[in-house]
């Protein structure tokens, strides 16, 4: 169990390191890149890296960093209205005040 958690933490940090190396190519901070897309690209790279001759590996890594620089996240949008929690609709009747009698 401990070993699995350490493995996940190590993998997460390795993806973040590669993203931090690709971020200057895109001109954005490392958190401005999509983690999900970077992870998918790194997995695809890892699955095919064994086919690459050792001399061509640095070029492939450079191409990978160029590809990761394309995964820039869009700007965060400004909300017109603040977030609000909607009131839960109850299926029970509510007690409502009786209408006021009009004096004659």
Image: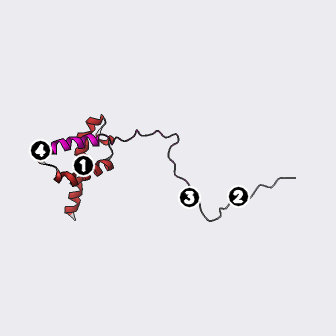
User: Regarding mark 2 in the picture, which secondary structure is present there?
Assistant: loop
Q: Earlier in the sequence, mark 3 or mark 2?
A: 3
Number of dots carrying numbers? 4
Do the residues bearing badges 1 and 4 touch, measured as CB atoms within 8 Å?
Answer: no
User: Magenta stretch: residue 53 in it?
Assistant: no
Mark nearer the viewer, 3 or 2: 3
Q: Which label is found at residue 15? A: 1
Q: Which label is found at residue 93? A: none
Q: Which label is found at residue 55? A: 4
Label 2 – label 4 distance at C-alpha: 83 Å
Q: Which label is found at residue 88? A: 3
Q: Earlier in the sequence, mark 2 or mark 4?
A: 4
Front position in the image: 49 or 72: 49
Residue 35: x and y, percent? 31, 48
Point out the stretch of residues depicted in magenta.
Answer: 57-86
Do the residues bearing badges 2 and 4 touch, measured as CB atoms within 8 Å?
Answer: no
Residue 14: x and y, percent? 21, 49
* Predominant secondary structure, magenta span: loop
For the point 20% across and 44% down, the residue is 60
Mark nearer the viewer, 1 or 4: 4
User: Regarding mark 3 in the picture, which secondary structure is present there?
Assistant: loop
């Amino acid at each position: 169990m401990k070993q699995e958690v350490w493995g996940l933490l190590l993998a997460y940090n390795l993806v973040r390191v590669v993203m931090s190396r690709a971020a200057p190519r895109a001109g954005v901070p490392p958190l401005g890149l999509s983690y999900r897309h970077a992870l998918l690209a790194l997995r695809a790279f890892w699955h095919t890296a064994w086919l690459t001759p050792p001399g061509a590996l640095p070029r492939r890594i450079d191409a990978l960093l160029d590809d990761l620089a394309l995964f820039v996240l869009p700007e965060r949008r400004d909300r017109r209205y603040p977030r609000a929690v909607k009131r839960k609709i109850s299926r029970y009747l509510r007690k409502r005040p009786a209408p006021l009698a009009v004096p004659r």
